[in-house]
Amino acid sequence: MLIIIRPSGEIALKSPRSRRNFEHTLANNIRSIIKEGKIWRSQGVLFLEVNDNNKNIEELSKVFGIASFSPVMSIKSYNNNLEDIINKAKEVFAEIVKGKIFSVRAKRIGSHNFTSLDVQRKVGEALYPFSRGVNLENPEVEVFIEIRNDVAYFYYKIIKGPRGLPVGVAGKTVVLFSGGIDSPVATWMMMKRGSIPVILNFNLGGSVHRKFVLEELSVLRKWSGGHKLKLFIVNGTDVLIKLSQIEKRNRVVMLKRVMYKVAERLCDKANAKSITTGESLSQVSSQTMTNLYVTEYGIKYPIFRPLIGFDKEEIVELARKIGTYEYSIKLPEYCAISTKARTSVELDEVLKDEKNLNIDYEKVLENSEVIEI
Ligand SMILES: Nc1ncnc2c1ncn2[C@@H]1O[C@H](COP(=O)(O)OP(=O)(O)OP(=O)(O)O)[C@@H](O)[C@H]1O
């Protein structure tokens, strides 16, 4: 089976060098998902040749960097002969247009002694007797012919990809991953922009928490362009016990600060250049602008919050589409940390608490469980 894969529109807008790199990463990602066959680049698209029974093809709709793809039939070296194209079109499409109102769409790259309009008209005429008529604006089925130099491709299915950029082109980010609804969506958004997530979870609910995090990550793994996901699980209850030494009103922001600080150490270790969270402005009291300012004060890496402007309904909609929602909602409430924060903590107080607590972030990270998914 031959498949034509169209990269996201924005890849085509890059400089020739970046475009080549992006397409190359996309091809590698596809290769590691499809696991067999041949893949090659040609004039802005990728071609993939695989066994007809390859079930992994469906996974292409989750590969970032793909705008769409189509299984195609092709004829080679037809010597600029429109008759050959018409005959092949009849062979491929007669059954598809049978009893239906249809339209033919044709595109061309290269020099030929006919135009795309000629192809549409002639193939339309040839298919007409099999059909119920032609309607260019509102057909029941569309059939496509794409002529690229001396090869003509025929297809009738355009399957959408998720667009975005191939995972791997944008470097690594450490994601603070709670297992709630938001952070899996934030992880997905960063992968959509080409970043490889390194997952950091503070376990606050023992084996139940661990189980849901792993399940959500196995869903996200389907969107990772074949890249393995590395998960670091920190013992969050140990941290909570330490935090019982400070005033209740500062604990939630302090816990978040500990998370950011450990994430900072993990960035150093994993060569990641940013931290990502699932925070959305003012969603809960720990996510007010003041509290976010205090939480991230002095952190040396940029903090990305891809959901900052989203409301909960929008996030839920995305979580459903991604497939993590059904696991996130089962995560018990005790794993949510933000319910009892003051909306505006004092930076000086928190910095003083931090000094007194004197947590060894390096050690916290060293003691984490590391899993590769
Ligand atoms: N246990 C945790 N381990 C790692 N990161 C966490 C943890 N709890 C919270 N975070 C990070 O802080 C962000 C905000 O968490 P918070 O509990 O305040 O809000 P939330 O809306 O419930 O987020 P989520 O739905 O992702 O749990 C999370 O999106 C995540 O990035």
Image (spheres, rainbow, N blue to C red):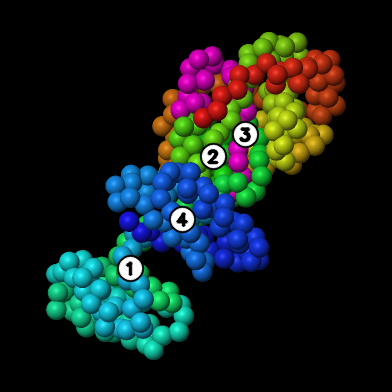
Element under label 1?
strand
Q: CA distance from mark 1 to mark 3?
A: 42 Å
First-in-chain label (1 vs 2): 1
In this view of the protein, which residue sits in the foreground, 315 or 5? 5
Q: CA distance from mark 1 to mark 4?
A: 16 Å
Q: Which mark is residue 198?
A: 3
Q: Which residues are magenta?
A: 194-215
Task: Name the residue that disc number 1 marks.
Answer: 74
Question: Are circles 1 and 3 on residues that touch, CB within 8 Å?
Answer: no
Residue found at x 33% / y 44%: 55
Question: Are circles 4 and 2 on residues that touch, CB within 8 Å?
Answer: no
Residue kind at label 1, given as amino acid type: Ser
Q: CA distance from mark 2 to mark 3?
A: 11 Å
Choose mark 1 or mark 2, whichever is in front.
1
Choose mark 2 or mark 3, whichever is in front.
2
Q: Magenta stretch containing residue 146, yes or no? A: no
In this view of the protein, which residue sits in the foreground, 288 or 111? 111
Q: Quadrant of the N terminus?
A: bottom left
Q: In x, y percent, where is residue 91?
A: 21, 70
First-in-chain label (1 vs 4): 4
Choose mark 3 or mark 4, whichever is in front.
4
